[in-house]
Image: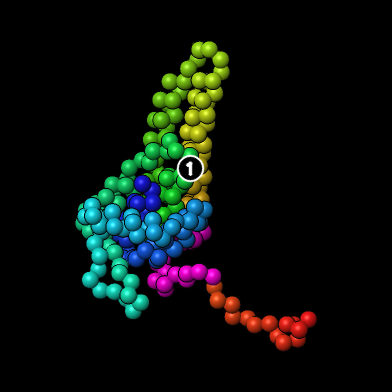
Amino acid sequence: MSVRMSILAMVSRHPGYGYLLRAEFDRRTGATSPLNVGQVYKTLDTLERDGLVTRSEQTDADGHVFYEATAAGHAAVAEWLTTAEETSTPSRSDLAVKVAVASTLPGVDIERMLQAQRQAALARLHRLTRETPTEGPGLGPRLVADAILFEAETELRWLDHVEQRIRTACATGTALEVAFDIDPPRRGRPRRTDKPEASEASD
């Protein structure tokens, strides 16, 4: 869901096509888990089928077809950005990706989004604390419950860290928004521009 909604959020701010959106996603999230461009185009097709994006009738000089969000797409992004994320799966952190992308987009109230996430995390922590087993055979159930509690506490500490970094960035005048790089992203290996000298080649 984080990939789908991140792509939709990006095209809600600026039209894009598959390779461009893949490059922007990787750039905005640090490329810890790079996307496959086929996954991006498949996601765009699904978003179009669901009425959340539409294709532009015009293409650029290279023939790229751009996608932009529909009114329903903008509404879906607004709901996504103001709704707390479920963090039950430890693979690619949906929450980290959501915060990373949202912090780079113009017009997003990142502090409000973090507060909503904090309230949800605190409620989850209180619920888990009440539900933690105190009796039972062996340590297994308690150890699992402890792991879940530590995960919730870690989320709260991370949210504190994010808020502090954002405050520091604002205080020092560091820009949070990341402008779209409209130049077509490079594909494959970069071309080598430096050629070895003849003397070096003969060594």
Q: Residue 201, located in which quarter of the rendered image?
A: bottom right
Q: Does residue 161 show up?
A: yes
Which residue corresponds to the image point at 33% horizontal and 56% vertical from the top-left? 42
- Front one among 26 and 107: 26
Rendered position, 58 above or below 99: below
Tell me the magenta residue range: 171-189
Query: Mark 1: which amino acid?
Result: Ser
> Does the magenta portion include 175?
yes
Is residue 85 or residue 109 the one in the foreground? 85
Residue position for label 1: 91
Please give left or right for residue 179 compared with residue 56 in the image.
right
Q: Residue at x 42, y 72 (%)?
A: 184
Residue nearest the viewer, comparing 76 with 162: 76
Q: Is residue 89 left or right of residue 194?
A: left
Residue 87 lies within the magenta run: no
Is residue 178 visible in the rendered image? The answer is no
Look at the picture and state if 140 lies above or below 160: above
Categorize mark 1 by other alpha carbons within 10 Å: few (<14), some (14-19), many (20+): few
Secondary structure, mark 1, is: loop
Q: Where's residue 60, x and y in %?
A: 32, 76
Look at the image and tell me in which quarter the C terminus lies.
bottom right
The residue lying toward the viewer, choosing from 88 and 161, is: 88
Residue 75, position in %: x, y? 24, 51
Residue at 28 percent of width and 47 percent of height: 79
Q: Report x, y in % for residue 2.
A: 38, 48
